Amino acid sequence: MAGYSLSIVRTFDRPVGEVYRAWTEPDRLAQWIGRVERADVRIGGQYCFVNDDGEGGQFVHHGEYLELVPGRRIVMTFRAGKAEDGPYHDETIAIDLRPIDGERTELTFTNRWQGEALDDEGIAATKEGWNAWFDLLDAALA
């Protein structure tokens, strides 16, 4: 079975440590990712984030932390709702952080999954969704 991935690179005008904490401290995470139902930020710990879908429903995102390297890297499984029944499985997201000039951070986001490939429209929609979250992250860091 083929594996798929997509990547997004963003630059934030904050030091690496602040960007890492925005991903790993539940109070900071809740400032941009949505309602944090659970964030047991440790290897093997579980998370659950909830967002309104704009139509009276909710999107539920959940998974497990697989790798945490302070100031450098976060890897976690990622599921939307009951995605186990969907066409995508074994989905992970990796956040790699690189300092720029000591005061800025380059974030490389990589989404990997098994199952069906996304068409061009699906790739664009996925990138649009993650970039909307990254815009919220940028505002929370300001």
Image (tube, rainbow, N blue to C red):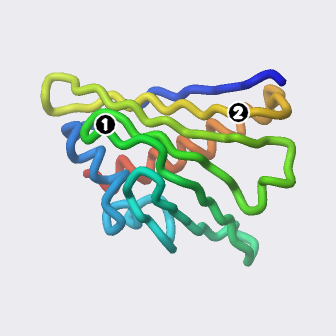
Q: Is residue 72 left or right of residue 112?
A: left
Q: Residues within 10 Å of mark 1 (few under 14, many from 20)?
A: many
* Closer to us: 39 or 135: 39
Earlier residue among tags 1 and 2: 1
Instruction: Name the side, left or right, on which 38 lies relative to 96.
Output: right
For the point 82% across and 28% down, the residue is: 117
User: Which secondary structure, mark 1?
Assistant: strand
User: Can you say whether 67 is above or below 47 in the image?
Assistant: above
User: Residue 41 location in percent, x, y?
Assistant: 38, 58
Could you say which disc has been placed on residue 12 in the image?
A: 1
Q: How many marks?
A: 2
Answer with the quarter of the image where residue 127 lies: top right
Q: Which residue is mark 2?
A: 124
Q: Nearer the viewer, residue 121 or 117?
A: 117
Amino acid type assigned to the residue bearing label 2 in the image = Ala
Whole-percent x, y for residue 81 in the image: 73, 62
Q: Position of residue 84 (x, y in %)?
A: 79, 53
Q: Quadrant of residue 118?
A: top right
78 is higher (above) or lower (below) than 49? above
Say which residue appears at 67% left-offset and 53% top-offset: 79
Q: Is residue 63 above or below residue 30?
A: above
Front-lying residue, 130 or 39: 39
Secondary structure, mark 2, is helix
Disc 2 residue crowd, few under 14, some 14–19, many 20+, Cα 10 Å: few
Residue at 70% x, 33% y is: 124
Please report the residue visible at 20 percent of the width from the left and 43 percent of the height from the top.
Answer: 17
User: Horizontal placement of 74 versus 52: left or right?
Assistant: left
> Which residue is most to the front?
44
Q: Position of residue 105 (x, y in %)?
A: 27, 32
Give the CA distance from mark 1 to mark 2: 22 Å
Q: Quadrant of the N terminus?
A: top right
